[in-house]
Image (cartoon, helix red, strand yellow):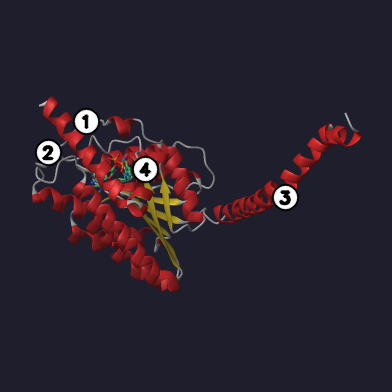
Amino acid sequence: MKLQEMEKCSPSSDWNVLYWVIGSILMPIALPLAVINLWQRFRSQKYRNQLPGKVVLITGASSGLGESLAHVFYRAGCKVILAARRADELERVKKDLMALDVEPAYPPTVLPLDLSELNSIPDFVARALAVYNHVDILINNGGISVRADVSATAVDVDVKVMVVNYFGAVALTKALLPSMTKRQMGHICFISSVQGKFAIPQRAAYSASKHALQAFADCLRAEVASKKINVSCISPGYIRTQLSMNALTGTGTSYGKMDGTTAKGMSPEKLAERILQCIIRKEPDIIVSDIQAKIAYYLRHLLPSVYFWVMAKRALKLEKAAKKSN
Ligand SMILES: NC(=O)c1ccc[n+]([C@@H]2O[C@H](COP(=O)([O-])OP(=O)(O)OC[C@H]3O[C@@H](n4cnc5c(N)ncnc54)[C@H](OP(=O)(O)O)[C@@H]3O)[C@@H](O)[C@H]2O)c1
């Protein structure tokens, strides 16, 4: 073998290629990413240190994601106000929180609230404001779902879902806004769903209410930006909670079943932690889901005809499954 050929095959030339790949390709990508990551950690820590003592009003705090949110904000040293219809369940959540060993710890406040009673919401907000004179973070989380075809859903059910999921959050936000505007600070968070980004069969009322919530959040964010009020819209995929158990059927009765997708959903505790991060980083809009929901989201916006075809197949499959079970 000639000397030049031997040099080409030598281990040192392999190392040169490796150095070239690291220096010219990996470093220019990895270095900025590492710097951004460090910066985000630094900012998160800085804002996390500002959380103790903040007043956080959480709706739907009697179970599921709302209960987990109550835990993460309480552990972060916040003054939590727990709202939902079932006062006994709110008292249970309060008791669980007070049993935690955290510092600082402020006794949680329980305030019963029915989001479908729109006329009672201004009075509810007055009572919430009377506790600490202000609310720093409002988390519009309370909600219900529905499991039925459009043709099998009574209009009353469409209205009920829309009132609880959309108008309830709208009324609460509007009643609290003057106080936040006066203080020139505050954060309003909407728990939407990936179904607020794209719709799936048998969820028309639910999906419509979440699409409305997304649009409301986007408009509000623009309007209050100059008043130093932040708005975040969170769109989770399936969460392991009682949502399907508490869902309505088309006639308004309780669905009462744990769906396989919900049972296999993400942990509400992990999601609550991600939502806390979203609030301290002041992220305007996040999707937290598996890859399947993310693909559906991109298909809906980039290749709508493919998405329509997939959803038509899904609707047919659900229809066949329903006929079989009847
Ligand atoms: N689970 C999922 O797969 C999933 C996925 C994406 C988004 N989400 C959203 O996450 C949020 C929380 O739901 P979850 O999954 O934690 O379900 P959940 O366990 O059924 O909790 C729903 C909460 O909403 C409250 N609520 C229902 N109707 C209400 C009303 N009329 N007035 C006041 N509060 C009411 C319930 O409390 P009371 O019964 O005591 O009133 C309960 O605390 C909802 O907005 C839901 O749309 C859930």
Mark 1–mark 3 CB contact (< 8 Å): no
Q: Amino acid at mark 2?
A: Thr
Q: CA distance from mark 3 to mark 4?
A: 35 Å
Q: Amino acid at mark 4?
A: Ala
Mark 4–mark 1 CB contact (< 8 Å): no
Mark 4: is the Cβ under 8 angstroms from ligand 1? no
Q: Which residue is mark 1?
A: 257
Q: Quadrant of ligand 1?
A: top left
Mark nearest the camera among 2 and 4 is 4
Q: Is residue 94 visible?
A: no
Q: CA distance from mark 1 to mark 3?
A: 55 Å
As drawn, the label of residue 293 is 4
Q: Amino acid at mark 3?
A: Ser
Task: For label 4, count other residues whose C-alpha is less than 10 Å away and answer few (under 14), some (14-19) or many (20+).
Answer: some
Q: CA distance from mark 3 to mark 2?
A: 63 Å
Task: For label 2, count other residues whose C-alpha is less than 10 Å away and answer few (under 14), some (14-19) or many (20+).
Answer: few
Q: Which residue is mark 2?
A: 253
Q: Earlier in the sequence, mark 4 or mark 1?
A: 1
Question: Quadrant location of residue 244?
Answer: top left
